[in-house]
Amino acid sequence: MFEPLTDDEWSEDYLVDDVQMDLSHFLVGTIEHYLDDVLLQADTAVLKQLRLAAIQESIPLHGHHLIESWQQCVMIYPDNLMIAMIKKYLLAERLGIWYLRETLVARNDHFMLTNVFNEMIQAMLGGLLALNRQYIGHPGFKWSLQLANSMTVKPIQFGQRLQAIYRKPPNEAVPILHALLLETVELVEAETGIDLSVTKTAVSRLRKPLNSERVIG
């Protein structure tokens, strides 16, 4: 199926022997505009980072000289991009909802708690990818365990602890994620010198559940 032009992209998808094939097409000028935006202007737009990540991992079949010149460009992850991405993903306001963690457990509100888990983990992954100077390759951070394992600088046993969050009961998962959040923020702050004290305060805030909110069973 061929899709019309949307967001600078022509896309098509089809099946070949039951294998899903997804293709994206861009003008050369569009890609070069993305390179300038991200590398020179520290544009944190995820869709633009996806294209740079794809270039970095691509195997050229045609136009080798052009694509290899792009690959040389994306090899250098600029300092100002790292700082902008860290400030975007480890923003205190973004992590502020974590203060509801014990209340959501007490209410047995697993749906909202899972949403909060996802938001916190995406924030950590975004910040750690920037710290490791890696572009975001998927808007939903697909293959998160492999992604975690690809990072050099990260909390101890980061990937295993991420998995445990979704395998443990909520009352056991919350302390694991809480420790990871604090370790991530402290690690990023130590490695970069960026002041994340407001973020640490936001992560440490806690709203204790009322007795009337506690659900038995």
Image: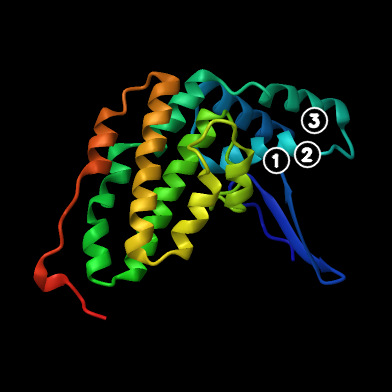
Q: In which quadrant of the rendered view does residue 181 lie?
A: top left
Contact between marks 1 and 2 (CB within 8 A): the answer is yes
Residue 137 seen in the current view: no
Label 1 to label 2, Cα distance in Å? 6 Å
Q: Secondary structure at mark 1?
A: helix
Q: Residue at x 52, y 56 (%)?
A: 163
For disc 3, the marked residue is 67
Q: Amino acid at mark 2?
A: Ser
Q: Residue at x 51, y 35 (%)?
A: 154
Q: Tell me the number on the disc at residue 54.
A: 1
Image coords of residue 138 (percent x, y)? 59, 48
Quarter containing the C terminus = bottom left
Q: Residue at x 38, y 59 (%)?
A: 173
Please say which color scheme the image uses. Answer: rainbow
Placement of 174 over or under 8, stated as above or below = below
Q: In which quadrant of the rendered view does residue 35 lie?
A: top right
Image coords of residue 115 (percent x, y)? 38, 61
Q: Tell me the number on the disc at residue 58.
A: 2
Chain-order first, disc 1 or disc 3: 1
In the shown orientation, is residue 109 left or right of residue 183? left
Image coords of residue 27 (percent x, y)? 72, 38
Q: Secondary structure at mark 3?
A: helix
Q: Categorize mark 2 by other alpha carbons within 10 Å: few (<14), some (14-19), many (20+).
A: few
Q: Residue at x 37, y 30 (%)?
A: 186
Question: Total of numbered circles in the picture?
Answer: 3
Chain-order first, disc 2 or disc 3: 2
Label 1 to label 3, Cα distance in Å? 11 Å
Q: Amino acid at mark 3?
A: Ile
